[in-house]
Image (tube, rainbow, N blue to C red):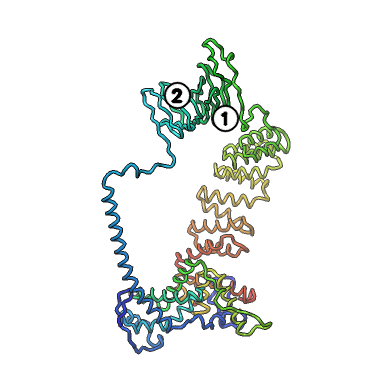
Amino acid sequence: MSAVTDDPREVAPDRLLARDDEAGRALRTLHADPSVFGEEPEAWRQLEQRLDRGRVSRVALRWAAIGAAAGALAVAGWSWSRHRGPLPVAEVREPTHVVAQLALGEDARPLPLPAGRSQLTNGVDFSLSSGGLAHVQRTPRATQVSLSRGTLEVSVTRRPAGQELRVEAGSYDFRVIGTEFRVTCGGEQVELEVRKGRVAVEKAGQRWLIVGAGESWRSAETREADPGPSALPSASPAPVRTPTSSAAPSEPPPQDASACLRLAREHQAQLAAGCYQRVARGQGLSAEMAQLELARLRKDVLHDQRGALSALRDYVSRYPNGSFRTEASISLVELLAQLQPTEALRESERLLASGEAHERRDELYLLRGRILQDRLKDCSGAEREYARIEADRGALGDQAELRRGQCLETLGRSAEAIRVYEHYLGRPSPSNAQLARDRIEALEARAPWGGSNAD
Amino acid sequence: MTLRWGSKQAVTLGVLDLPSTHEQRGDDPLVQLCLGGDVAAWRELHRRYYSVARAFLRRLGVHERDAEDACQEVFIRLLRSLSSFRGECKLKTWIYKLCLTEAGRGRRRRRGWDLTQSGVAVEVTEPTVSSAQSELILRERVELVLNRMSVGDRAAFVLYELEGLSGREIAEVLACPLATVWRRLHYARRVFLDEFGVKGSR
């Protein structure tokens, strides 16, 4: 009798049942267990009963199906006879959110804006408060909204081509340059709050100021007579400009790394990037770190890969012997792998040849293999890269060996692929053992060989 | 009394004198009689293979409480599809295949049958355990080890070690190459011997 070795292609092994050891004894308890065999006569009787019941239930099911079909036909017929004419209006369901669609005519007649949400067909959204009063009309050069009372929120999703959007409230006009803002007209006061973009405030055809995103403006107007046409704007009560808390354009920008980090943690990525950029212009380790952080922020948060690439290239050129040169170089290769794979291969080859990334060469081989396999569809080259890492017993080697097997499969080198997968399964804790086993079985099923094992 | 079963075969209950061992008679004539609607032949077929099917289902992990139903399903499917049997393999091989399918179906329905709750309560109230109890404990250990094997490995292991099939017969049941049979058996034995054997002497 031959013993089974670690090679699964060994000849037929001895039967454990015949062994006189713990394994044999254990298996014999299962083999001799009488409960697994059941009671055949009783089982036959139950099978007969079930088959009889099955016949009855099948007949019953057939009649039930016929009955159900007849019932469905009856209901359909009744419905059809009942609804032969147009459906009564009362049965039409109202949508839960009504957005009035307004189509402005060319005849320049003002159209009252309904309370709630409404939308112009030229892409402007309004929301008028309950009890508010506003009209909208089209003029040759603009879509004009007149707000008499209440609060009107405006969102311009698409600026009408050749058409301004203007909101008139009190004696003020708000000319829309940007996108989202709110105008409130109540009693003697007019208030503007801009969420996105910019809105110009004008009076008597003269521009007073532009209110930007995050800013608000409130008039000091009372029910006094309007200034005459000769009055200068400066003679009118001065507007009060109240920036909202979300923007502080008058404060000096932060310039230390901790401030940049704080901005990043507060999810103000653009401001953080600007901050890091300023710090990176300085000298020393903090400038180096800021340069790398800028690259990371652009890549991971702002999804600006080209900006990140530029930042990394800046680092590499400014700090050829920098403290983070290796990390920057590898990050550069990783980014190039997505944007310019051929350039990534050249850069990684230069890195490997220079020895500057010696302690991370396995990472680079794996990265090169992935570029060749996934981006350039060169499994032959990829397989060679992966083969360089097979001695690694960790996660890198795990990934490389599995990918190597996949490459060999793609290249049609099935026997080699099986050997690589088998070797992979011999790892201490292969992360994708089932995948490897499935691939082996699939390759064996396809191949003409069935093994030369004796039976 | 006439029974009509799924394949609209009308059979008559009766007694037929048939040789009891299929080695003497072989399955083919039995299959022909079954196809002819001979209920005694069906009875004989059930008698021959019921315990084989039931034991195999249990050893694949089908719980005791579900084994009877599963075995019935196997024979119902056998009954319905026997007319398409062309003798490409032994009838026993085909029954093994039906058992594998039924075991898989049950697994998907119930997401794992628990052999640890075999319905047998083992209460050890005395300081020493009787031989019957120790055998029961050992058997449950074996079942737990079988549960650790993958489905394919367990099937190969059970067919080889417990059912005594050859490698080629197992390859026919599992519809895979012989090398795959040995590979699955190798992995299954490694799991089994890790529990009950000494490593290195497999």
Vertical order, A48 against A166 (above or below): below
Q: Residues within 10 Å of mark 1 (few under 14, many from 20)?
A: many
Which type of secondary structure does the marked residue at label 2 adopt? strand
* Foreground pick, B13 / A435: B13
**Where is B10 relative to A297, above or below?**
below
Closer to the eye: label 2 or 1: 2
What amino acid is labelled 1 in the image? Ala
Which residue is located at x 27 percent, y 51 percent? A80
Position of A104 compared to B201: left or right?
left
Nearer the N terminus, badge 2 or badge 1?
Answer: 2
Give the image quarter of residue A426. Answer: bottom right
Q: Are the two marked residues, 2 and 1, in contact with CB atoms closer than 8 angstroms?
A: no
Residue position marked by numbered label 2 in the rendering: A144
Q: Looking at the image, which residue is at 63% across and 76% down? A: B197
User: Label 2 to label 1, Cα distance in Å?
Assistant: 22 Å
Q: List x then y, in percent, for residue B26.
A: 38, 84
Q: Position of residue A23 (x, y in %)?
A: 60, 79
Q: Which mark, residue A213?
A: 1
Front position in the image: B26 or A213: A213
**Above or below, comparing residue B145 to residue A95 in the picture:** below
Front one among B165 and B1? B1
